[in-house]
Image (cartoon, rainbow, N blue to C red):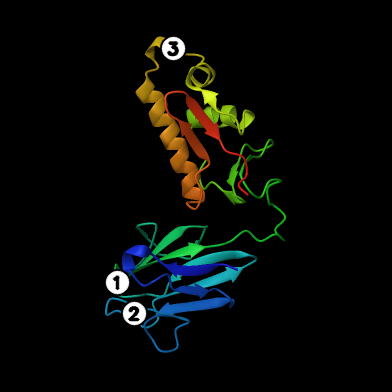
Amino acid sequence: MAYLTTSSKNGAGGQEWHLDKPVIFIGRGETADVALVHPRISRQHASITCESGVYYLEDLSSSNGTFLNDKKISQKTALTHTDKIDFGGAITLSFLEPVATEKADLPDKIIGVWINPQTSEVWVDGIRLKEDLPTQLMDLLRFLYEHEGQVVPYHEIKAAVWQKQDLEYVFDETRKKAIQRLRKCLLDANPAYDYIEISRGYGVMLKRERS
């Protein structure tokens, strides 16, 4: 079941609200399902509805607005796992949706990194990356994926990912930045576990599914 949770910056101790009704109302009013007591938040500030398994956020003509991932919304907008919702510039909640095993579009591999061979979609612990990886990062991930569980030497990574370029011009810093960008993309999908392991001075490993 999907739920909302307080962001750490609010210091509210990880409070959670489960989205267990077709429509959840958020605001500072006494009848709100998610009660957020703050003068910048309207009595009926926003709502989250579940339609055919998809959750939608809607601002209910609030005084100070509702923001999804730092962008003000003006219409009903679909939510995805780890979205940040800001209410009136006062309180930020995270939207989390654990993988439901009954969904038909689950990846073959629930735990670990998985690349769909038909679509090239990337999944991390059953959570699909929100955006496609740039070509260079996708090439890097594919190469590490082919050697999953093994430390791949830097010179092999360089030859595989930058094979069409003169290797003299592929500096260590370029390689380092690419690996860090890939690590960030995977962590954005699931911040709880880092699947990229760096063996300093030697190479990189894409770790197998965690126990």
Check if mark 3's residue and mark 1's residue have beta carbons within 8 Å.
Answer: no
Residue at screen point 47% across, 36% down: 182
Q: Is residue 199 visible?
A: yes
Marks 2/1: CA–CA distance? 8 Å
Which of disc 2 and disc 3 is earlier in sequence?
Answer: 2
Check if mark 2's residue and mark 1's residue have beta carbons within 8 Å.
Answer: yes
Question: Quick one: label 1, few (<14), some, or many (20+) residues within 10 Å?
Answer: some
- Give residue 64's mark: 1
Q: In this view, does 113 lie above or below 61?
A: above
- Residue nearest the observer in this picture, 65 or 74: 65
Q: What element carries label 3?
A: helix
Q: In this view, does 190 lie above or below 134?
A: below
Marks 3/2: CA–CA distance? 58 Å
Check if mark 3's residue and mark 2's residue have beta carbons within 8 Å.
Answer: no
- Give residue 42's mark: 2
Quadrant location of the N terminus? bottom right
Which of disc 1 and disc 2 is earlier in sequence?
Answer: 2
Q: In this view, does 100 lie above or below 171?
A: below
Residue at screen point 68% across, 52% down: 106
- Residue nearest the observer in this picture, 194 or 132: 194
Query: For this view, does 193 lie left or right of residue 181?
Result: right
Say which amino acid is labelled 1.
Asn
Which of disc 1 and disc 3 is earlier in sequence?
Answer: 1
Query: For this view, does 120 lie left or right of residue 176?
Result: right
Observer-side mark, 3 or 1, equals: 3
Residue at screen point 58% across, 27% down: 143
- Give residue 167's mark: 3
Q: Position of residue 184 (x, y in %)?
A: 44, 42
